Structure formats: C-alpha cells, structure tokens
Image: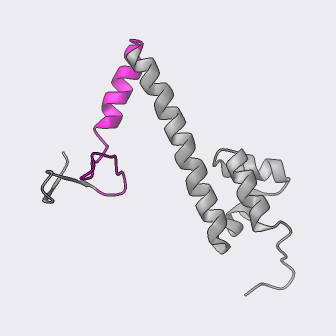
Amino acid sequence: MRRKGRSFKYSPALVAGVLKEAHGFVKRAAEILGCPPSTIYRYIHRYPEVRRALREARRETREAVERKLYERAMAGDIGAIVFLLKRMGNWNINRGGERDESVGEETNGEGAAHTLP
C-alpha cells in the first residue's frame, strides 16, 4: 500500500538499469538519478525486479574484481597473493566444485557435508 504524499517517481526498470550502470552501488545509483539513497532502497524493497538487478550487478562487480585480483596474484603481487589466499579460506565449495558463499558447509563429493574450518 502506498503512503499518501509519497509517489514513486521512477519506473522500476529505470532504477534497475541505473543500479546495473552503477555496478550495484546504491549511493552511486542515487547520485545518477538525483535522489537520496533511501529512495533506491525503497525500490529495492518494493520491486523484485530491482532486487534482482542489484544482486546481478553486485555479482558481476564481485566477479570482475576477483578476476583482477587473480591476475595480480598470478603476476606475483605478494599482497594480492596473501589477500587471495585469505579470501579463499572463506569460500565454500558445492558438489559441482563451484563457490557458494551463502552456506558454511562443503560437500565431500558424495553428498555428505562438513563445516569448513
């Protein structure tokens, strides 16, 4: 239900597109639209398509940063190597060998799970 006096000035598609353009950074998206970040958060809360766009933009940004970090580590950058090794300690691996950071378990390849240290 909409509150009196509060209108939704932007279309959800516009907000979703700006979030993608801003690489998932809410404050930057708000600057682009010329509104406060709270407006973007209201759209995220109200519209599932805006939430999906935010998740996708953040996932793409995270993957791009991880690729750059990996490149620097493989080039011998000690700081990148240490950071990457520490970060990998927080990764969880699912049965397909893909990273799954949403759970604190790793499977042993036969479906049985155990908690990572």
For the C terminus, the quadrant is top left
Q: Main secondary structure of the magenta part?
A: loop
Compared with 40, 71 (above or below) is above
96 or 1, which lies in front?
A: 96
Residue 96 drawn at (x, y percent): 27, 50
Residue 69 vs residue 107: left or right?
right
52 or 26, which lies in front?
A: 52
Q: Residue at x 27, y 55 (%)?
A: 104
- The residues colored magenta run 75-103
Q: Residue at x 81, y 67 (%)?
A: 11
110 or 114, which lies in front?
A: 110
Residue 84 vs residue 65: left or right?
left
- Name the residue at the top extreme: 76
Residue 2 vs residue 116: left or right?
right
Quadrant location of residue 80? top left
Q: Residue at x 27, y 52 (%)?
A: 94
Q: Residue at x 59, y 62 (%)?
A: 52
Residue 18 drawn at (x, y percent): 75, 52
Query: Is residue 112 located in the magenta-colored stretch of the structure?
Result: no
Compared with 85, 31 (above or below) is below
